[in-house]
Image: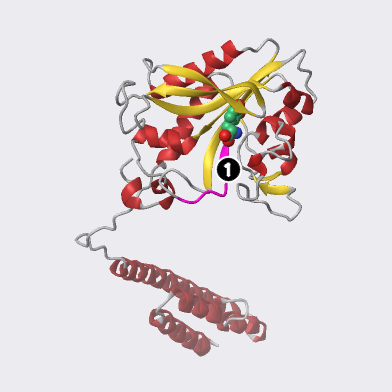
Amino acid sequence: MKEQLQAIRQQALSAVTGTQSTADLETVRVQYLGKKGELTSLLKQMGKLTPEERPVMGQLANEVRAEVESAIEAQSAVLAGKALTEKLEAETLDVSIPGKVLHVGHKHPMYTVLDEIKEIFINMGFEIMDGPEIEQEAYNFTKLNTPADHPAREWSDTFYLDSESKTLLRTQTSPMQIRAMETYGVPIRMISPGRVYRKDEVDATHSPMFHQIEGLVVDKGITMADLKGTLNAVIREIYGLGTVTRFRPHHFPFTEPSCEMDIQCHKCGGVGCPTCKGEGWIEVLGAGMVHPKVLRNCGVDPDVYSGFAFGFGLERLAMGQFKISDLRLIFENDIRFLEQF
Ligand code: DAH
């Protein structure tokens, strides 16, 4: 048995020092010291020895085990050091290689304007609401007091999605007046920005898709004075305190009376120039007192409640703010254009 132990020691030690990886080392450990390992198997035969031999062999076996264990520990440290060196060599960093330029994006000019407007209205106690771009005819037209024979309902003006003209891509954000009152009731103070669609040919001032911001205020005792006061305050936040405004009578089916709001041309001060097309004034929005029929369509009693509504085009506002001359630039997403803002 002594010779066998000596042989195991020899083989184990040379196997340990010959390993090239921690996985190899573990295999060797199991092979000699594991539960079914060679040393363990040999020790199981101790019973066959004489009582005098047993303690001598036991001690020798313990020495062999201790020697092999410490050799494994030492080899483990050697292998770890080797692995680290290899890793460091593989990961060599060449600091002289030019870096990659990362393009950091920023807000689109139209969203810059939208966020500014939202901020203004939120500060005045308005809520922001989101509405569907695919709309029912009833919400886009009928409930907004726009009867079946109204020209806005023409096939040539509207993207219908079915042959019965029941669903369509909304032509305006005004259906959100109805949805807001139906869902939340009155009193209410909200704006609803979003995309709208019309069968327009693309040119410098038209696009089949553009953005509007709808606004609605309904409460007891709301008058035209509230409409003018609110919209004047908003426009002066956007265009500056000294901005001169005017309200012109107009017609919209869902408001009565209706008006359009103009600002005096900031370029020429009202004299007339190319920016205002010689008018001296620039139209900024449509508005009016919510028509009693519209209130009634939403289950609101017009003898108790009144309100005003308004709608404006977001692209037009952004174009004015950033002096953008062609609407198409806003949608083309040409980085050379967008980077200027
Ligand atoms: N929906 C109208 C349009 O697309 C804009 C508008 C005008 C909205 C008057 C309103 C309003 O809420 O009161 O031309």
Occupied quadrant, residue 81: bottom left
Task: Give the tally of numbered discs.
Answer: 1
Occupied quadrant, residue 177: top right
Q: Which residue is mark 1?
A: 196
Task: State the colouring used for the structure image.
Answer: secondary structure
Q: Residue at x 31, y 22 (%)?
A: 271
Q: Name the foreground residue: 85 vs 255.
A: 255
For mark 1, does the 10 Å Cα neighbourhood hold few (<14), some (14 to 19), or many (20 or more) residues?
many
One can see residue 180 in this view: yes
Q: Could you tell me the amino acid type at mark 1?
A: Val
Q: Residue at x 65, y 81 (%)?
A: 44
Kindly tell me whether mark 1's CB lies below 8 Å from ligand 1: yes
One can see residue 191 in this view: no
Q: Position of residue 282 (x, y in %)?
A: 41, 27
Q: Name the foreground residue: 109 vs 73.
A: 109
* Local SS, label 1: strand
Any magenta on residue 128?
A: no
Q: Please give the range of residues in magenta.
A: 193-202
Any magenta on residue 195?
A: yes
Q: Is residue 64 above or below residue 190?
A: below
Q: Position of residue 198 (x, y in %)?
A: 57, 46
Q: Is residue 172 above or below residue 117?
A: below
Q: Residue at x 72, y 44 (%)?
A: 136
Q: Quadrant of ligand 1?
A: top right
